[in-house]
Amino acid sequence: MLSPIPVHDISLPHLRHACSNCSLRELCLPAGLTAEDMHAVEKLVTQGRPVKRGEALYRAGEPFKALYAVRLGFLKTSVISPDGREQVTGFHMSGDLMGMDAISADLHACDAIALEDSEVCELPFTEMETLSRQIPALQHHFYKVMSREIVRDHGVMLLLGNMKAEERVAAFLLSLSTRFQLRGYSSTGFNLRMTREEIGSYLGLKLETVSRTLSKFQEQGLIKVHNRLIELLDLAALRQIISNEQGG
């Protein structure tokens, strides 16, 4: 299991060599880069920028300058509807790349807010784009990451378009499980950094519906909930909830 490094324990020498040594490197950078290629990347990347809980990494309407790789922590992206309500559009954890939605318009389309004290590595886009032309593996990797984001967005559209409340919550928990497992963490026990209300906003559900559904899952023995700690006790049953919906 990975052991996240506390913000206050990170030394400057570690930061300078973070890309080479980072256990999350292959989530935001391609495997197989030569030492020379990695050195070129490290020269451009600003490692370890702190973002305190509640602070914005960027705001909607701000000029697009860089992509951000989440190194530590958890962030959400959201937009404000015309009537002033917040609509959560995504949750981002270590290894995720953020900011790609701004590439086409050169402006950020959403707010990115830290849900806990976090750290990001800043990848200046123009310079990284130039470097990618020189390193085909890097360019291909960014295409793959963009494709991954498109697939994830498509999955959210399916959630909101076809699934009932129980299917949406089950799919959300299973998605988090997979993402934590990919990063070397437990796939069956994790803390929810977001509130029930934020989950509801993301899934298109009311707060009460999210809370009621989680309580129902607990009563059925599928999960165990203690404040924000979630234990997935029956992954197969959670998958079956989604399968039943898709099969119907």
Image (cartoon, rainbow, N blue to C red):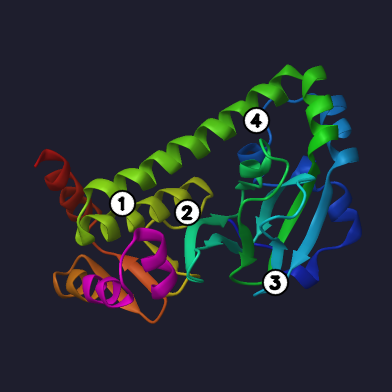
Of mark 4 and mark 2, the one earlier in the sequence is 4
Q: Which residue is mark 3?
A: 55
Mark earlier in primary sequence (3, 4): 3
Q: Quadrant of the C terminus?
A: top left
Q: Which residue is mark 2?
A: 180
Q: Is residue 36 above or below residue 164?
A: above
Left or right, 2 with respect to 88, comes to: right
Q: Nearer the viewer, residue 116 or 109?
A: 109
Q: Amino acid at mark 2?
A: Phe
Report if residue 209 lies within the magenta region: yes
Instruction: Name the mark nearer the viewer: 4 or 2.
Output: 4
Which marked residue is nearer to the observer: mark 3 or mark 1? 1
Q: Crowding near pointer 2: few (<14 within 10 Å), some, many (20+)? A: some
In the image, residue 169 above or below residue 243:
below
Badge 1: residue crowd in 10 Å (few <14, some 14–19, many ≥20): some
Residue, disc 4: 142
Mark 2 or 3 closer to N-term? 3
Q: Secondary structure at mark 3?
A: loop
Total label count? 4
User: Is 172 placed above or below 42 here?
Assistant: below
Q: Is residue 144 left or right of residue 225?
A: right
Which comes before the other along the chain, label 1 or label 2?
1
Looking at marks 3 and 1 on the same chain, the residue that comes earlier in the sequence is marked by 3
Dot 4 alpha-carbon crowd within 10 angstroms: few under 14, some 14 to 19, many 20 or more: some
- Find residue 160 and name its label: 1
Spatial separation of the CA atoms under disc 1 and disc 4: 27 Å
The residue stretch that appears in magenta: 196-214
Specify the amino acid type for callout 4. Phe
- Disc with the residue nearer the chain's start (1 vs 4): 4
